[in-house]
Amino acid sequence: AQSVTQLDSHVSVSEGTPVLLRCNYSSSYSPSLFWYVQHPNKGLQLLLKYTSAATLVKGINGFEAEFKKSETSFHLTKPSAHMSDAAEYFCVVSEFPGGYQKVTFGTGTKLQVIP
Amino acid sequence: DAGVTQSPTHLIKTRGQQVTLRCSPKSGHDTVSWYQQALGQGPQFIFQYYEEEERQRGNFPDRFSGHQFPNYSSELNVNALLQGDSALYLCASSLDGRAYEQYFGPGTRLTVT
């Protein structure tokens, strides 16, 4: 069965310090993994994606994520937080059991950036 | 290049009524998926349309139905509305019946009183 666990519902960092948002997944297939960001009253924007190529994935706005199969993790990082990074972040797993796609969202991590 | 658009932006309905939400996919995309996002939750998959057919469905009752038109735009219909249907409804478009990369619209905020 496919599932996604975002280990922290809220993360608070100071501006200019590193960001780490944790995501663990389970999948019976070779999944694709994504991180999306949602600013208040806005739709979801794709930050980055892993689709079985390089395990270290670079995304927009300085975000990165590393796919670690042995740990079933796909944590999102950024070296230095900016005020504009304050938003909700969703880890997403996608797989194709039986030829049809199944997409599962995590419950989200709300990132607060303190000036 | 227009992204995914949804209408209306906000909607208020009464229990028992019916509602139709609309989505136009990103230019060149032929697949539309619908999600329900309750307050404080992650989006939940409702169903996906490709080639004007419902390809797969999440764990939602038959009160939720949809349609895809030849121009790839889509509608989500919800009958016999319940207060629990209050949520942000998101439409996402992608290519070729797959969603390696989905583009999301801004959503329709539905409030059921």
Image (cartoon, coloured by chain):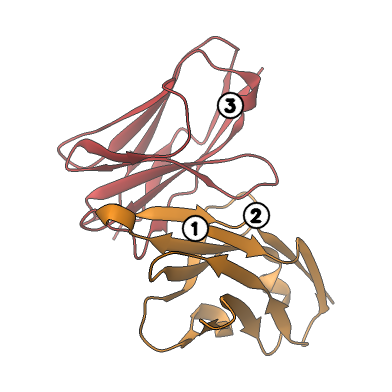
Chain colours: A orange, B red
- Would you place residue B53 above or below residue A86 in this image? above
Q: Residue A107 has which mark?
A: 2
User: Do the residues indicated by labels 3 and 2 lie within the same chain of the protein?
Assistant: no
User: Which amino acid type is shown beneath numbered disc 3?
Assistant: Asp
Chain for numbered disc 2: A
| Rendered location of residue B49, percent (x, y) | 28, 41
Q: Residue at x 64, y 83 (%)?
A: A77
Q: Which residue is mark 1?
A: A2
Q: Do the numbered discs 1 and 2 sit on residues whose CB atoms are within 8 Å?
A: no
Q: Which residue is mark 3?
A: B85
Left or right: where B94 falls relative to B113: left
Which image quadrant is residue B110 in?
top right
Quadrant containing the N terminus of chain B in the rendered view:
bottom left
| Rendered location of residue A60, percent (x, y) | 50, 79
Left or right: where A20 falls relative to A13: left
Q: CA distance from mark 3 to mark 2?
A: 18 Å
- Would you place residue B96 above or below residue B52 in this image? below
Q: CA distance from mark 1 to mark 2?
A: 14 Å
